Image (cartoon, helix red, strand yellow):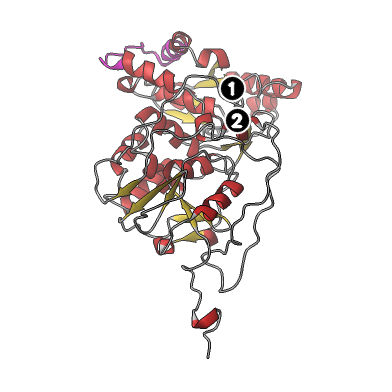
Amino acid sequence: MKAAGGRGGRRRTPYNTPMRIFLYGISALSWWLSAPATPGEGNRVGQNALRNCKPDAAAIQYLAHCCPQIPRPYHVTVSVRMKRCPDGVAPHRSQFKLVGRPFCRVASGIYAPCPELCFVQVANNLDLHELVKVGNALCGTFFIDPKARNGLGKRRPLTSVRRIGAFIERNPGILGAKPARRALGLMVDGAASPPEVFLAMALGLPYRFGGYQLPGIAANRRIKPSSKARAIAHRSTLVPDILCESSRLDIEYDSNTEHATAAQLTRDAQKRLALEADGYKVITVTARQIGSQGEMRKIAEQSRRRMGTRLRPQSAAFRQQQRALFRTGWSLSRYHRREWLEGAPEPVAPAPLCPTPVDALTAPGRALRCPAVPKRWPLSDAGTFSGLKSTTLEPNSPEIEGGASPGITPRGNTPEM
């Protein structure tokens, strides 16, 4: 008698399905930065789902078909050491035993580490400023969407500083834990755009890391105004961009794209008047100012005067670290393919020649539908991740082999965000 659910007596299990791809590190970060939401708990799987996972060329072609925003090489997690791997693939293997269900199904047959694990994975490959920036983005309320007017969409935060810290505590000794912990103490929740992420860093980071060390920085924290302020703002709550509650200071980012309509200008003016009616000092920072060290110093000095203190960066590393911080900038465009960001017209490509993906956790024989053919297909590998090589990850390993951080260019973002 043949075994149910298979030919020739072989029974299909959740771990010998035709296709499973597990994104790793920088490639997973590319996905999360452009994801409109977090998959539900029903899409979470444990580390045992990695069993017998060795993506072939067809699987990588399918990945490129489903995720055109992810640059090459594709960083993927594998269960065993691969003697040969497809072109444009950087395999990673870990022997660390993760607690719980740290992977999320993000598409049929495609999995990504949860945002907390993703942050820890990239911690050894990014310098501190870049790590804090992407951490703030993961904890923010925006995602990269080239189709939107300003290049951004809104979403609930994927994670938080507290949740990332709790993940590291549940997995002590995981590779990347030390730099991740260091960055956590410098991160903020709730940023609504990449410029707000950078603004919080420039104003809130300690002097030794190139920031202006304003105490008590909070991004987009909702406050309840007085009845007088509510009448001015015509709303029951207000959300300052960058708030220092102890000194009643609000720092607002004024983006040309965000404030293009008359209705938005009116709403922002009402917000400012309402905050000032409640005794808040409102300082506006423009897109031109945010990229200038001199202009940002003036903003910091003005903020310090409001606090009744003076700006006194005494760290010997302040100037060097601040130059590094401003070289990092606020752009996140390096984590996505340039063609995807620009939306350049490209010829339609045929559907990838790969087996129909079957989800690792579906019932035997229950296939999921392959996504539709994309309207545009990337023509080149512009925007690839350079300097990140494949590696075998060991518990408590001090560093990832070939883990040099990719070069960061100070050029403007594409699209504007």
Which of the 4 quarters of the picture holds residue 240? Answer: top right
Which one is nearer the viewer's eye here, 86 or 301?
Answer: 86
- Dot 2 and dot 1 residues touching (CB under 8 Å): yes
- Residue located 54% across and 62% down the image: 42
Q: Amino acid at mark 2?
A: Leu
| Location of residue 72 with respect to 8 vertically, above or below | above
Residue 153: x percent and y percent? 63, 37
Q: Residues within 10 Å of mark 1 (few under 14, many from 20)?
A: many
Per the model, the C-alpha gap separating discs 2 and 1 is: 8 Å
- Residue located 61% across and 38% down the image: 378
- Residue located 44% across and 31% down the image: 133
Residue 304 shown in magenta: yes
Per the image, the residue denoted by label 1 is 275
Which of the 4 quarters of the picture holds residue 68? Answer: top right
Residue span colored magenta: 299-318
Per the image, the residue denoted by label 2 is 238
| Location of residue 149 with respect to 296 vertically, above or below | below
Q: Residues within 10 Å of mark 2 (few under 14, many from 20)?
A: some
Residue 19: x percent and y percent? 52, 61
Horizontal arrangement in the rendering, residue 179 relative to residue 34 (left or right):
left
Which one is nearer the viewer's eye here, 273 or 181?
Answer: 181
Residue at the right extreme, as displayed:
262
Residue at the bottom extreme, as displayed:
1
Q: Determine if residue 90 is in view.
A: yes
Residue 63: x percent and y percent? 55, 50
